[in-house]
Amino acid sequence: MQQESLIEYGSRRVIITITAIFCALLEIVDTTIVNVALNDMRGNMGATLSEIGWVITAYAIGNVIIVPMTSWLSQQFGRRNYFAASIIIFTVSSFLCGNSTTMVELILFRFIQGLGGGALLVTSQTIITESYPPEKRGIAQAIYGLGVIIGPTLGPPLGGYITDNYSWPYIFYINIPIGVIATLLTLQFVRSPKYGKKKSISEIDFLGIGLLAVMVGSLQFVLERGQEDDWFNDPTITLLTVISASSLFFFIWRELTTPNPIVELRVLKDGNLRVGTILSFIMGFGLYGSTFIIPLYTQGSLGWTATQSGMLMIPAALTTAFMMPLIGKLLEKGVPQQYLVAAGMFLFFGFCFWGYKIITPADTGADAFFWMLIVRGVGMGLLFIPITTLSLSGLKGQQIGQGAAFTGMMRQLGGSFGVALITTFMARQNMLHRNDLVAKLDTNNPDVINRVNGLAHSFAAKGMDADKALGSGYKLLDYSITKQAAILSYMDVFLYLGLMFLICVPFVLMVKAKKAAKLDPSAVH
């Protein structure tokens, strides 16, 4: 059997596992490490805010385009060769990103880095899954999950530290030594499964590749830029939405009718994988959405540095790391995945509701976040491994790679949707709350008059003339209203994000309970 021939033992399995995790970490850390360095890059390159946003967008587009194609590319070139080539592409483009002198260069090399990076994530998961015997798959997914959950958390503090103490190119240069070592280890230890006959050039589904690239590229652009460009009031966003939807339709039609599809959609006939892809999307929404919102609040409203905001997330990441092997053991003992996922979603709701309760316009201390983020860490641990093992449990051979590609892509898309929707929702709620607060301010109210006069007196005491002092008093009052509106918007995000997970709990229990009979017992243990 193909699967069993790839099972490794002893030190060889340890080396392969470490190599795969490092590669997955490289890719995931790079999705968030850049965020805190954008200001420095912008100043260095003389770029506008919208131009510098493309540094993130270009990487995400490259990432999402390549993920569904990884299984097919592995078959064409051999998994070991394709994995090693992806690491080399990622490492070389990291060096080129650090050496970029213009925005065009940086955006181009980030796109190429995204093409290399997307392959690292999914192929790492497949390599780890197939290196372990079926009864150890829960532990295998726990080990892989460490990288996926901790990666987005490590990015901001690492990026903040490097940017504060060195300069922004070093956030790319740190990939180089890890990439070189990972390439050598891959060529030495990773084995390729025996795939069928390779397809000739004439059999390659170039139309499918083109439709996929247009579809995800357009969608990613719409998600990343929609809020900034006022969504469907902008003709470019509207056009790209139509292009993305049309490309999706023709891509599905093409892949189901061509004899040599670039993405094997038929693997979605497996009920467990279908459920798993939906749950992966929801998990990505919560994982990336919460990783996005907390640093935004601490830096924007509390005035923390990027390093302080990043450090806040580390205890939760360590909690997840501690949870992973325990959950792997529970799966090995036969605890049903639906119970673990439901518990994880309920805990994630608890984390969000806690966030909703503790956020204030005044200074919220780091200790107020500690236990709330620990709950998030436990919840994420309970979600990742059961969802992944459920998704892949009914698949065999090369289907594992195809299934991993679907769940990986849906997790990334969930993250993109999460960040885009949260950004849009916050902008709208901000406006709503601000208008509401301003409407309640009566300039004839004695309390309001006393507040403005008190502020004006304090400015006058510092040497300002009376008119300027009064103007500054009104400005300060306006600033406090803006800040209060922002805090109310953050509270809304936490509340609605939590409710989304809470609503999913009964559906998870119902859907998975029906599917449980079809699970491959060897993959559940």
Image (tube, grey):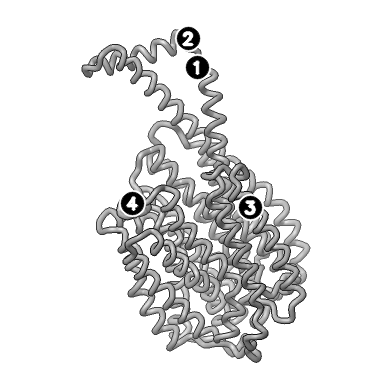
SS assignment at label 4:
loop
Q: What element does badge 1 sit on?
A: loop
* Horizontal side of residue 360 vs 401, given as left or right: left
Q: Which residue is mark 4?
A: 46
Label drawn at residue 40: none
Quadrant where the N terminus sits is bottom right
Query: Residue 52: percent from the left, percent from the top?
Result: 41, 53
Left or right of 273, for residue 181: left
Image spot of residue 498 (x, y percent): 59, 45
Q: Position of residue 442 (x, y in %)?
A: 50, 13
Asked if residue 399 is positioned above or below residue 275 in the image, the reply reads below
**Which of disc 3 and disc 1 is earlier in sequence?**
3
Looking at the image, residue 401 lies above or below residue 2: above
- Contact? badges 1 and 2 (CB < 8 Å): yes
In the rendered structure, find residue 445 and report the number of the disc placed on it: 2
Q: Which mark is residue 239?
A: 3
Mark toward the viewer: 1 or 3: 3
Instruction: Examine the rendered structure and indicate whether residue 369 appears above or below residue 456.
Output: below
